[in-house]
Image (cartoon, grey):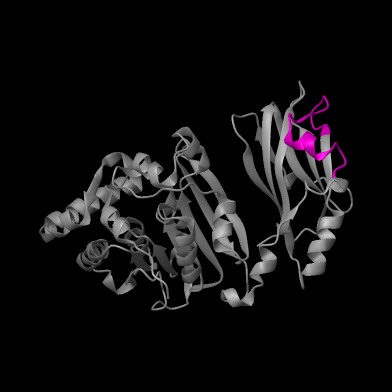
């Protein structure tokens, strides 16, 4: 198996937050040099800050979920989360690229008398998890995988996903795009220095569709997706929605990666020509919910269905720029009914917005529509991209 160079990442992540990003950092080697009593009291003080601070809700939400369950954590750091859940009845596997981090967690578990419910895996440059069993109820990825480039993260995630039970959960904390924009929209090899200090080699924003792309072709269902702490963090809780363990060879990746350009085929546009969508944009009719434009999905859908043995659902990736007001982008079903639960609103802003509309388990949509979301005034928008694809 091909290897990747993780030396710069190991050098960085032997330092970890002292419970919270606002509390400074500590090297795992510093902790290991302490006597047992000082070591445990220092670790416990940091853990208490973690549990009582902006991440305290994690316990309330997941204590019962993880009790008597088997969880693997990707990028475990100093083990604050896993130790907490072990003490509430979980079995936990700590996976990390830094040996000293794992040594800290092992020592904590031993001193607390809970080592029997802890397992450890040192992540090598081959990004393999072959040594682990395939019986995990959940994968916990807390602020770690977004610190390596997307393709590296994809290899790592897909390997670990193969160890998740059918209907298991994939849970992840990331930095959102809103934070990246607010902090200067820097290249990812520079942005990490802003988010996590000068020694950080990488930080990349994620949204739920980026996570889905990383886990493609696994079928996923969203349980939770929200931002918190002034848009500094985003939390995802996804279900691996399949009845068999994940094997990439079971999927037609080429089909799932297929995308049809909805803007290139002008016969599918019921309002205006292609240059209207890409130029100054379209001004919406006056009135709340007034439809400004419609794309007929019939022909593109038939092309996808003809190419697929089965098509459980579709997704439409849209890049929209709103220069005045706000618009809602949504879907209409085959019976002509608007699907309000699938609508995403896009407000006026300095750049374009990437969104994904999904129709899974509700039948195939018939149209993509854009409508005005200003009761007073006429919004203006332009679609930069609209692509139809199978949903994973």
Q: Position of residue 48 (x, y in %)?
A: 29, 49
Decide which of 345, 303 is in the foreground and name it: 303
Where are the magenta residues, as a range? 269-291
Whether residue 360 is visible here, answered yes or no, is no
Magenta stretch contains residue 285: yes
Image-quadrant location for residue 53: top left
Magenta stretch contains residue 144: no
Q: In the drawing, does residue 204 fall left or right of residue 239? A: left
Decide which of 150, 287 is in the foreground and name it: 150
Whether residue 24 is visible here, answered yes or no, is yes
Task: Residue at 38%, 43% (x, y): give it.
Answer: 190
Decide which of 303, 89 is in the foreground and name it: 303
Task: Residue at 59%, 64% (x, y): give it.
Answer: 216
Q: Quadrant of the N terminus?
A: bottom left
Q: Quadrant of the C terminus?
A: bottom right
**In terms of secondary structure, what is the magenta stretch mainly?**
loop
In this rendering, is residue 345 above or below 253?
above
In this rendering, is residue 205 above or below 85?
above
Q: Position of residue 76 (x, y in %)?
A: 34, 60
Q: Position of residue 304 (x, y in %)?
A: 78, 63
């Amino acid at each position: 198996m091909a290897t990747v160079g993780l030396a710069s990442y190991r050098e960085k992540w032997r330092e970890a937050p002292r419970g919270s990003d606002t509390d400074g950092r500590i090297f795992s080697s510093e902790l290991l040099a302490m006597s047992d009593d000082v070591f445990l009291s220092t670790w416990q003080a940091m853990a208490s800050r973690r549990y009582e601070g902006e991440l305290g809700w994690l316990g309330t939400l997941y204590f019962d979920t993880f009790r008597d369950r088997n969880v693997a954590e990707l990028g475990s750091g100093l083990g604050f989360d896993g130790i907490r859940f072990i003490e509430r009845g979980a079995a936990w596997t700590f996976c990390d690229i830094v040996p000293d981090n794992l040594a800290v967690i092992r020592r904590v578990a031993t001193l607390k008398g809970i080592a029997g419910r802890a397992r450890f895996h040192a992540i090598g440059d081959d990004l393999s998890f072959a040594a682990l069993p395939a019986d995990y109820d959940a994968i916990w990825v807390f602020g770690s995988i977004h610190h390596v480039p997307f393709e590296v993260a994809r290899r790592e995630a897909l390997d670990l996903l193969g160890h998740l039970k059918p209907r298991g959960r994939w849970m992840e904390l990331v930095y959102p795009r809103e934070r990246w924009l607010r902090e200067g929209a820097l290249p990812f090899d520079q942005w990490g220095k802003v988010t996590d200090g000068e020694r950080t080699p990488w930080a990349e924003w994620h949204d739920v569709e980026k996570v889905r792309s990383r886990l493609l072709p696994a079928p996923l269902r969203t349980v939770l997706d929200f931002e918190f702490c002034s848009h500094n963090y985003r939390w995802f809780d996804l279900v691996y929605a399949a009845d068999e363990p994940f094997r990439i060879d079971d999927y037609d990746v080429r089909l799932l990666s297929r995308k049809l350009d909805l803007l290139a085929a002008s016969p599918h546009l019921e309002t205006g020509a292609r240059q209207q969508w890409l130029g100054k944009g379209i001004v919406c009719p006056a009135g709340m919910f007034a439809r400004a434009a419609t794309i007929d999905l019939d022909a593109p859908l038939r092309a996808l269905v003809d190419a697929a043995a089965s098509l459980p659902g579709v997704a439409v990736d849209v890049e929209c720029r709103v220069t005045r007001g706000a618009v809602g982008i949504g879907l209409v079903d085959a019976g002509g009914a608007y699907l309000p639960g699938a609508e995403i609103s896009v407000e006026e802003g300095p750049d374009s917005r990437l969104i994904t509309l999904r129709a899974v388990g509700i039948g195939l949509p018939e149209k993509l529509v854009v409508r005005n979301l200003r009761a007073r005034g006429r919004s203006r928008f332009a679609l930069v991209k609209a692509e139809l694809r199978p949903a994973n």
